[in-house]
Amino acid sequence: MSMPQTKRESLLLNLGLSIVIPVLILSKLSDQLGAKQALLLALAFPLGYGIYDALRRRKFNFVAALGFFSTLATGGFSLMRLEPFWFAVKEATVPALIGLMVILSQWTKRPLVRTFLLNDEVLNLPRVNTALDERGTRPAFDRLLGSSSWLLAASFALSSVLNFALARYLITEMPETPAFNAQYGKMMAWSWPVIVVPSMGVMIFILWRLIKGLRAITGLKLEEIMHVQVETKPAPQKESPPDGRA
């Protein structure tokens, strides 16, 4: 039975509208458009993409919502001409809030760790749940999810610290100036190698640890836990003997 296909986010479109185009606007058009207008135009692209993606997939995304309000806060802070320190605080607040919600959601019916790690497009959740019930290992699975929640929260804490440090290092000018826009654009460009890559590395380790634990408590193989197409080679056919010979 084929699984229903859900609309996936376009990574290239996300990168282009959330980082590449805003960075180009901030670095190249601040003098021509004016610092305030260039910043608002640059922020309009990630805001517009966030609204478009939410409407297209018709699915509430807690993390995307925080990113949406973070972008709005950047525009608001700039219009209020707040000190650069507060931009660093804002950059650190978003991942810190996500990490806090990951921890607090453990005691709710829908822990966020399931949203981040138990993706039914990657994991064969019905088969995993059946194996857990058959082997009576659901308590072990709950403990595995609990420890994964703390590791996931730690990854967001790391992201929060890196966000704050990067913003404090790069942003030193006051808003509504071309120099501030250039620094903010540089921070957006550096956020991937400095922040996203280490955080993704931690996330991959957590997912690897989760799958390893699932193999132990369910007795399933990797291709049974994940939606992996295993190619089977057809058995070689025996050559038929020539006519009239045994």
Image (cartoon, grey):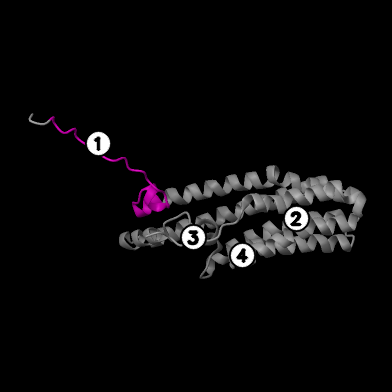
Label 1 – label 2 distance at C-alpha: 60 Å
Furthest-front residue in view?
243
User: Disc 1 and disc 4: Cα gap in Å?
Assistant: 48 Å
Q: Earlier in the sequence, mark 1 or mark 2?
A: 2
Please, is residue 244 above or below residue 12 in the view? above
Q: Which residue is mark 2?
A: 91
Q: Is residue 135 visible?
A: yes
The secondary structure type at the circle numbered 2 is: helix
Q: Viewer-proximal residue, 125 or 164?
A: 125
**Residues in magenta, as a range:** 214-242
Q: Nearer the viewer, mark 4 or mark 2?
A: 4
The amino acid type, in three-letter code, at marker 4 is Arg
Dot 1 or dot 4, earlier in sequence: 4
Q: Residue 5, labelled with which disc?
A: 3
Point out the residue furthest to the bottom here.
109
Residue 64: x and y in percent read: 65, 61
Task: Please state the horizontal and vertical placement of residue 21, each as a whole percent of the image.
Answer: 76, 50
Dominant secondary structure of the residues highlighted in magenta in the image: loop
Q: Callout 4: 10 Å neighbours few (<14), some, many (20+)?
A: few
Q: Residue 194's spot in the image, x, y percent? A: 70, 43
> How far apart are the two marked residues, 3 and 4, measured between alpha carbons?
14 Å
Q: Which residue is mark 4?
A: 56
Sequence-wise, the earlier of marks 2 and 3 is: 3
Distance between mark 2 and mark 3 Cα atoms = 34 Å
